[in-house]
Image: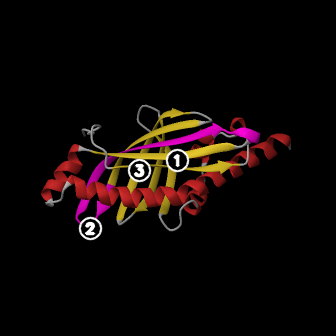
Amino acid sequence: MKVLHDKILSQSAYSAEIDMPADMLDIADWLFTLPEAEYQRCCIPDHIASGVTTTDDGRRMSINVEMIGTGLVVQHYVAEEAGPNYCRMNSISDVFTANGRTQVNVIWELIAEPMEEGRTLYTNRVTSHPTDAFMGFLEQHDLTLEGAAQARQEASSDHNRRETPLFAESIARHARARLEREVA
C-alpha cells in the first residue's frame, strides 16, 4: 500500500477549551482506555464502535468504526507518538461506499496546549491522504480526485467539528475521574 503524501483529500482542525490545566490531562491514557459507549457519545450517530489492540510488533492501536458522510470507515490508528498532551495516530483506513471498498491514509492528531488561567486548548486535527488503492478505485469508477476530495473535505470537516467539543469534554471527565481516584 502506497500513501500519496503529496496529495490531500481532506484536512481540518477544530479546537475546544477545557477548564483544566494541560498538565492534569493525559490524552494517551484517555484514548487507550476510552470505553466504547463513551466513544459513541462523542459523535452520535456517527461513532459506531471502538476498541484497543496492538500491531504485530507491539505498538498501541485504536480501532474506530464510524460514518464519515455516506462512507462507513474503519480506522486502524497506530500510535506514532502518544503522550499526555500530544498523540499522533496513523491509519490505513478502510472506506466502504456505495461503489465498494477502498483505503485512505488518515493522520489524527490530538493536541492539548496550555492557556491562561489554568485552561487548556484541545485541538483535534485530521488529515487524509489518498493511497494508490484509492486512486485505482477512482479510476475504476470514473471519479475525479478533485470531486472525491471535495466530498471528503465537506464530510470530514463536518464530522470533526461535531466531535471535537465532545472529545474535549470526555478528556476532561477522564482527568477528573483519575484525580478523584488518586485522592481517594
Task: Indicate the quadrant where residue 42 lies.
Answer: bottom right
Real-space Cα separation, disc 1 to disc 3, in angstroms: 16 Å
Task: Indicate the quadrant where residue 117 lies.
Answer: top right
Front position in the image: 33 or 99:
99
> Which is more N-terminal, label 2 or label 1?
2
Q: Residue at x 22, y 65 (%)?
A: 99
The residue carrying mark 1 is 124
Lateral position of residue 109 relative to residue 56, left or right: right
Tell me the kind of residue under disc 3: Gln
Tell me the kind of residue under disc 1: Asn
Front position in the image: 66 or 6:
6
The residue carrying mark 2 is 98
Q: Position of residue 156 (x, y in %)?
A: 41, 56
Q: Main secondary structure of the magenta part?
A: strand
Check disc 2: other Cα within 10 Å, few if <14, some if 14-19, many if 20+.
few
Check disc 1: other Cα within 10 Å, few if <14, some if 14-19, many if 20+.
many
